[in-house]
Amino acid sequence: MRGARRAAESVLPEIAVQVPPGFDADGLWNYEVGAKTTWADGRVNLNLAAFYVDWSDIQVAGNDPTGAFGFVGNAGAAEVQGLEIELTVRPATGLDFSGGISWLPKRELTEDQISDEVVAPGRKGDKIPFVPEVPANAMAQYTFPLAVSEGWNGFIRGEFAYHGKSNSELNTESRFNRKQRAYEIVNLRAGAFDLDAGFNLTFYVENVFDKRGDLRVRTEDSLITVKWTNTPRTIGLDLSKTF
């Protein structure tokens, strides 16, 4: 018995790995160049931007090099490159349109998520999960004076948002990866307000078509998939007063 204990003790120092007591902050450098332009006597605004994000010392959930212990550490780096376009237009008094779209052709790891202390799943070239290639939004609003009361204005507003598809894991071949579907959301609002008195009355319908978009999908070790979706169709009335 003593001999077996001594044999086990002689092996432990060889396989023991020191798990770091914590993890450091990650680093993020964001570089952007663009232009903000105004046209048609201020009735049209067009903004363009190209950006580059350098992400280092990413905080990851991994294991020590032996695979014995799981913990959060720092490993790997990533880059995001993209373009953004924003447009606002006022073709007539009280009528406003706006929209924006982003394109992220590169959003991937530039280094393996491996260090002397931690080994995580990500490898160079893996796309960052939960980040779509194309998000977009649009809005249209018509504002008009109400004849029934001086100082009051009415409005009708429509909103549209698009969220592109993405994956839930860095490694898309992993059995834990789940596809997050693209989805669109439409909101409608109508109401009246008096800026001088500070009153606002708004009737709204959010998520008009009751879409269940994949905000986040995660698969557990048991391969049970857990999904978070956006808020279902919601109808309400807001009454507010500012002082």
Image (spheres, rainbow, N blue to C red):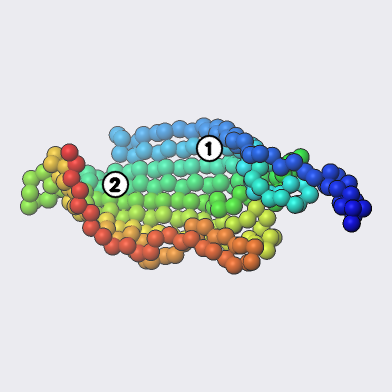
The amino acid on which the numbered mark 1 sits, given as a three-letter code, is Ala
Could one spot residue 74 in this view of the protein? no
User: Residue at horizontal 77%, vertical 43%?
Assistant: 17
User: Residue at horizontal 59%, vertical 42%?
Assistant: 80
User: Residue at horizontal 48%, vertical 51%?
Assistant: 135
Q: Position of residue 149 (x, y in %)?
A: 7, 49
User: Residue at horizontal 31%, vertical 35%?
Assistant: 42
Identify the disc placed on residue 50.
1
Q: Position of residue 118 (x, y in %)?
A: 72, 44
Quadrant position of the C terminus in the picture:
top left
Q: Is residue 197 above or below residue 185?
A: above
Q: Residue furthest right?
A: 3
Q: Pointer 2: what residue?
A: 96
Q: Position of residue 165 (x, y in %)?
A: 54, 58
| Crowd band around label 2 with a 10 angstrom C-alpha radius: few (<14), some (14–19), many (20+) | some
Pick the front one: 202 or 121: 121
Q: Is residue 65 above or below residue 214?
A: above
Q: Is residue 228 above or below residue 99?
A: below
Identify the disc placed on residue 118.
none
Q: Secondary structure at mark 2?
A: strand
Quadrant position of the N terminus in the picture:
bottom right
Q: Is residue 160 left or right of residue 57?
A: left
Q: Position of residue 43 (x, y in %)?
A: 30, 39
